[in-house]
C-alpha cells in the first residue's frame, strides 16, 4: 500500500496532448464518458505509447521489489528498508525526471507531425497550380473587394481592372456600379456579373440579344439593407433627423453655444418632436425575396404586425418566411389599405414595377402611411407623392436612398446617400458570391442567379471523360431537334444534356466524348442552324482540364 504508484489519471492530467479524459472505474477501464470501455480498445497516437512506457517505468521504479520475510540468498546483503518519507522523495524525483522526458518526446512527435502537414502539397483547386490550360480572363470595373478577388485561383485566372494587363481579351466582366456600355463588351465576353442585386447599370436586354448572361448576387447584401430599413422605420417614427437639425441649426445658434442654456432648451423643445412607437403597428412588405424576407423577420421581432405581398414568390423564398406569424396579401390593394409603413423590395422592371406606387395606388393607403424605398427610385412616383402631400391626402414621410426630381428639399422626404449595401461585410459577401458565380459558369457552364437567362445546372456524370458544349440560341420550336440531328450527323453520341429557356432565349448543354477540332465543329453547327447565337466548348468539365478557354468558342454576331 505504502509503495503503490499514483493513479493513472494523475499522469494523464499532467499530459497536455491527451486525447481523452480518464475516469478510473476499475484497474482496466477508462472513459471520458464513464462508459467503461477498455482503454486498450481506444485509438492511440504515437505519444500514447510513450505514455504507457513511462508509466510502467515509473511504477517499477517507485515500488522496488522486497524479498519475502525470512528469505535471504547467500552473499546477498539484506535490503535497506526505507521509511515513508524517503520512499516519497525517491518516487517524486523519479516521477519528475520521467515526466520531463515524456513531455520532451511528446513535443518532438508533435513537431514532426506539424512539419509533415506543412510539407503536404496544396490542392489544385485552391491554388490552381496544376491547371494546364490558358488562364480565364476577367476584366473588373470599380473597386472590387479583395475578398472576392482572392476567390480566383492564381494561374487559372487572370484578373485586372485594365484590359491591357490581361494576357487575352476578357472572357468575363465583373463590376459594381459602373455604367456599362455596349462598346466595352468585346466578342470574347461570355458573361457579366454584378457585385450586388440591381443590374440597371447594365444593358441587360441588349446583352440577352447578344447571348451574354448577366448575373447578380441576390441576398449577399440582404442583411445590410435590412438593417437600414429597420433604422428608417425609427427615423420615420421618432423625429430623429428633425430633432438633430433643430439642435444644430436652431438651439445652438439662438443660445450662442452656451452649454447651460442649450441643455435647458434641449429638454424644453423635446415636445416639438413627439413620435410614435413601431411596436403594434403594421408593416407592409412588397417583395418577399432575400431582403424582404429578412425585413419580415426583423419587424416581427420588434413586435410589429407584418403583411406581405409577392406575386412571383419563389419556393426558396417561401421557405424562409415565418409561416402564419405574418399575413400574406393576395392583392397589392389589400396590403396598401392595412399598412402603417410600406417598404418596397422589388426589382425595377420598366413595364411592370415602374411607378408601382402612384397616385392611384397611394390613394388606397392610410393618410399617415410612411413609405420606405431602398430598392429603386423609379418604383415610387415622386410627383404623385408631392401632390398628395400638398393636398393633405398624405401626411407621412418618405425615406429612401435615391434622389427624386420632384421631392428635392421637401421636409418630409428624408433622403440618404445610397447606403443600402454600403457595409464592408456586404461588399465582401457580394464580391465573393460574384466570383464564385462567374467561375462556375466559365468552367462548367452552370447558370445561377442570372437576370436574363434560365437557371441551368447539368451535374457531372460519373465515369464520363469527354467534352461539354454550351449552346445559346433563340427559343423557337425545333431548335433542340436540329442540334441533336447535327450531333448524330457527326457520329457524336450525346451522353447527357439539358435544355432550358427564358423568354426569347434558350440554353442547351451537351456532354459527349471528346472531338478533335472544336472550332470547326462549332462553325459547322452555327452554319447549319440559324437560331444559334453563340456556343462554347469546354474540354473535360469537372476535371480541371478545360483546354484553352477563350479560343474554343463561337459568336455569330462577331462573325457577321
Image (cartoon, helix red, strand yellow):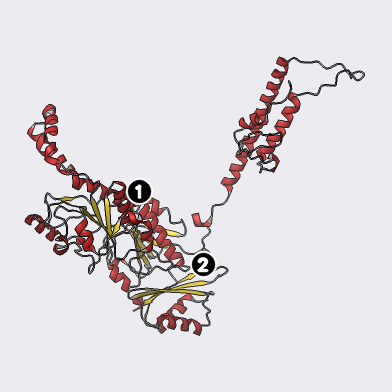
Q: CA distance from mark 1 to mark 2?
A: 33 Å
Within the image, what quadrant is residue 245 found in?
top left
Residue 255, can we see it?
yes
Residue situated in front as seen by the camera: 257 or 137: 257
Name the residue rendered at 44%, 63% in the picture. Answer: 440
Whether residue 55 is situated above or below residue 194 in the rendered picture: above
Which residue in the rendered view is the most extreme toward the front? 324
Structural crowding at the residue carrying mark 1, measured as other residues with C-alpha within 10 Å and reported as few (<14), some (14–19) or many (≥20): some
Within the image, what quadrant is residue 191 found in?
bottom left
Query: Circle 1 is placed at which residue position?
Result: 425
Query: Circle 2 is placed at which residue position?
Result: 460
Residue situated in front as seen by the camera: 52 or 130: 52
Q: Quadrant of the C terminus?
A: bottom left
* Contact, mark 1 vs mark 2 (Cβ under 8 Å): no
* Residue 70 percent across, percent down from the top left: 88, 17
Name the residue rendered at 51%, 72% in the picture. Answer: 467
Q: Secondary structure at mark 2?
A: loop
Amino acid at each position: 500500500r505504502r509503495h503503490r504508484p499514483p493513479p493513472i489519471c494523475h499522469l494523464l492530467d499532467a499530459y497536455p496532448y491527451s486525447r481523452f479524459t480518464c475516469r478510473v472505474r476499475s484497474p482496466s477501464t477508462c472513459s471520458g464518458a464513464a462508459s467503461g470501455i477498455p482503454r486498450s480498445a481506444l485509438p492511440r497516437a504515437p505519444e500514447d505509447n510513450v505514455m504507457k512506457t513511462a508509466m510502467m517505468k515509473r511504477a517499477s521504479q517507485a515500488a522496488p521489489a522486497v524479498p519475502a520475510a525470512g528469505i535471504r540468498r547467500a552473499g546477498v546483503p539484506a535490503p535497506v528498508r526505507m521509511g515513508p518519507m524517503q520512499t516519497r522523495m525517491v518516487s517524486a524525483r523519479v516521477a519528475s525526471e520521467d515526466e520531463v522526458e515524456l513531455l520532451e518526446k511528446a513535443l518532438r512527435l508533435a513537431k514532426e507531425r506539424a512539419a509533415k502537414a506543412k510539407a503536404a502539397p496544396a490542392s489544385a483547386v485552391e491554388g490552381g497550380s496544376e491547371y494546364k490550360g490558358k488562364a480565364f480572363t476577367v476584366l473588373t470595373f470599380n473597386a472590387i473587394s479583395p475578398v472576392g478577388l482572392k476567390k480566383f485561383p492564381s494561374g487559372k485566372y487572370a484578373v485586372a481592372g485594365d484590359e491591357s494587363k490581361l494576357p487575352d481579351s476578357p472572357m468575363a466582366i465583373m463590376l459594381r456600379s459602373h455604367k456599362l456600355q455596349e462598346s466595352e463588351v468585346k466578342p470574347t465576353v461570355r458573361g457579366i456579373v454584378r457585385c450586388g442585386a440591381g443590374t440597371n447599370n447594365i444593358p441587360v436586354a441588349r446583352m440577352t440579344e447578344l447571348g451574354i448572361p448577366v448575373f447578380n448576387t441576390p441576398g449577399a447584401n440582404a442583411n445590410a439593407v435590412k438593417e437600414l430599413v429597420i433604422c428608417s422605420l425609427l427615423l420615420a417614427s421618432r423625429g430623429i433627423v428633425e430633432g438633430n437639425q433643430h439642435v444644430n441649426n436652431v438651439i445652438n445658434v439662438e443660445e450662442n453655444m452656451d452649454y447651460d442654456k442649450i441643455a435647458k432648451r434641449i429638454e424644453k423643445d423635446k415636445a416639438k418632436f413627439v413620435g410614435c412607437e413601431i411596436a403594434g403597428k403594421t408593416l407592409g412588405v412588397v417583395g418577399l425575396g432575400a431582403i424582404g424576407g429578412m425585413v419580415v423577420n426583423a419587424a416581427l421581432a420588434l413586435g410589429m404586425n407584418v403583411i406581405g405581398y409577392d406575386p412571383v414568390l419563389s419556393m426558396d423564398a417561401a421557405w424562409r418566411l415565418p409561416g402564419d406569424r405574418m399575413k400574406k396579401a393576395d392583392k397589392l390593394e389589400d396590403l396598401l389599405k392595412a399598412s402603417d409603413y410600406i417598404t418596397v423590395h422589388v426589382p425595377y422592371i420598366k413595364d411592370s414595377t415602374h411607378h408601382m406606387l402612384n397616385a392611384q395606388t397611394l390613394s388606397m393607403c392610410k393618410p399617415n402611411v410612411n413609405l420606405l424605398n431602398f430598392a429603386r427610385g423609379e418604383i415610387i412616383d415622386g410627383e404623385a407623392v408631392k401632390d398628395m402631400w400638398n393636398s393633405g391626402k398624405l401626411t407621412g414621410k418618405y425615406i429612401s436612398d435615391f434622389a427624386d426630381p420632384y421631392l428635392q428639399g421637401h421636409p418630409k422626404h428624408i433622403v440618404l446617400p445610397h447606403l443600402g449595401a454600403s457595409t464592408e461585410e456586404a461588399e465582401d459577401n457580394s464580391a465573393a458570391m460574384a466570383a464564385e458565380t462567374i467561375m462556375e459558369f466559365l468552367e462548367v457552364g452552370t447558370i445561377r442567379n442570372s437576370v436574363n437567362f434560365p437557371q441551368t445546372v447539368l451535374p457531372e456524370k460519373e465515369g464520363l471523360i469527354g467534352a461539354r458544349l454550351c449552346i445559346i440560341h433563340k427559343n423557337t420550336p425545333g431548335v433542340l431537334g436540329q442540334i441533336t440531328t447535327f450531333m448524330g450527323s457527326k457520329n457524336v453520341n450525346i451522353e447527357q444534356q439539358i435544355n432550358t429557356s427564358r423568354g426569347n432565349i434558350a440554353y442547351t448543354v451537351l456532354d459527349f466524348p471528346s472531338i478533335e477540332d472544336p472550332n470547326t465543329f462549332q462553325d459547322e453547327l452555327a452554319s447549319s442552324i440559324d437560331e444559334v447565337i453563340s456556343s462554347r466548348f469546354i474540354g473535360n468539365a469537372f476535371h480541371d482540364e478545360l483546354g484553352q478557354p477563350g479560343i474554343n468558342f463561337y459568336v455569330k454576331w462577331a462573325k457577321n
